[in-house]
Image (cartoon, rainbow, N blue to C red):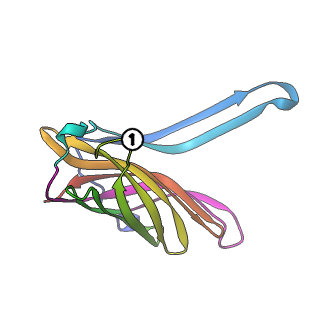
């Protein structure tokens, strides 16, 4: 994190970490082997729909971390990168903005809205774009102890010409 100029979230009410797997399915010519090394996950106490505020705004700050596949130099490289997370959300309008900055030298973000039909406001999603990439995010509000919607967590995926990244983000409410 420090090499990237990113301050990790002090989100003591959340958990995040790494996972890996090596799975082989099938046999003979139909056998497939799938591996994942340094996959990332995030977990927290998701705020119940009825506990989400219906007025006011919330600001959140934290970090994003994920895996990158980068072929922009002509050689494919795979590595882990980190960036900063900023979220501003209007609970009355059920919409806001999510930005991930300084992620592998790239900034991307976009509007987020409550996911209609799936939830009444404790989950959100939206499109991301910037720095030559585009993609999407899905996230949720989480409790910080007794404080409902005291944090956010979610995942993102972005890609562009010869570049792709996917990962998670966590953040704490700052107001």
Question: Which residues, given as a range, are shown in magenta?
Answer: 54-83
Question: What is the magenta segment's predominant secondary structure?
Answer: strand
Quadrant occupied by the C terminus: bottom left
Q: Is residue 158 above or below residue 121?
A: below
Q: Would residue 79 be counted in the magenta stretch? A: yes
In percent of width and height, residue 148 lies at: 17, 43
In percent of width and height, residue 142 lies at: 25, 43
Residue for badge 1: 118
Q: Quadrant of residue 28?
A: top right
Residue at the image point whose x is 64% and y is 61% from the top: 77
Residue at the image point whose x is 64% and y is 39% from the top: 35
Q: Please, what secondary structure does the residue beneath circle 1 have?
A: loop
- Please state which of residues 120 and 51 is positioned toward the viewer in this rendering: 120
How packed mark 1 is, by other alpha carbons closer than 10 Å (few <14, some 14-19, many 20 or more), is few
Q: Quadrant of residue 79?
A: bottom right
Q: Is residue 171 above or below residue 86?
A: above
Q: Quadrant of residue 173?
A: bottom left
In percent of width and height, residue 149 lies at: 20, 46
Residue farthest toward the front in the current orientation of the protein: 117
- Is 53 situated left or right of 168 in this image? left
Quadrant occupied by the N terminus: bottom left
Residue at the image point whose x is 26% and y is 36% from the top: 45
Residue farthest toward the top in the current orientation of the protein: 27
Q: Is residue 133 above or below residue 56?
A: below
Query: Total marks drawn?
Result: 1
- Please state which of residues 87 and 123 is positioned toward the viewer in this rendering: 123
Residue at the image point whose x is 28% and y is 41% from the top: 14
- Is 66 situated left or right of 121 in this image? right
In percent of width and height, residue 60 lies at: 24, 58
Q: Would residue 42 be counted in the magenta stretch? A: no
- Please state which of residues 140 and 11 is positioned toward the viewer in this rendering: 140
């Amino acid at each position: 994190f420090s090499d990237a100029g990113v301050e990790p979230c002090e989100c003591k009410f959340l958990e995040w970490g790494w996972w890996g797997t090596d799975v082989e399915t099938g046999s003979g010519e139909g056998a497939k082997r799938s591996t994942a090394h340094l996959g990332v996950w995030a977990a927290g106490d998701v705020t119940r729909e009825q506990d989400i505020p219906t007025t006011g705004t919330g600001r959140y700050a934290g970090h994003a971390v994920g895996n990158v596949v980068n072929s922009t130099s002509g050689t494919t490289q795979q590595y882990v990168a980190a960036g900063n997370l900023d979220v501003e959300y209007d609970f009355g309008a059920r919409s806001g903005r999510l930005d991930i900055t300084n992620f592998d030298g790239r900034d991307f973000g976009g509007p987020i809205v409550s996911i209609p039909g799936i939830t009444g406001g404790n989950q959100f999603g939206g499109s991301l774009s910037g720095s030559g990439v585009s993609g999407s995010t899905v996230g949720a509000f989480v409790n910080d102890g007794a404080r409902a919607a005291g944090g956010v967590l979610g995942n993102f995926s972005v890609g562009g010409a010869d570049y792709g990244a996917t990962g998670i983000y966590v953040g704490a409410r700052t107001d």
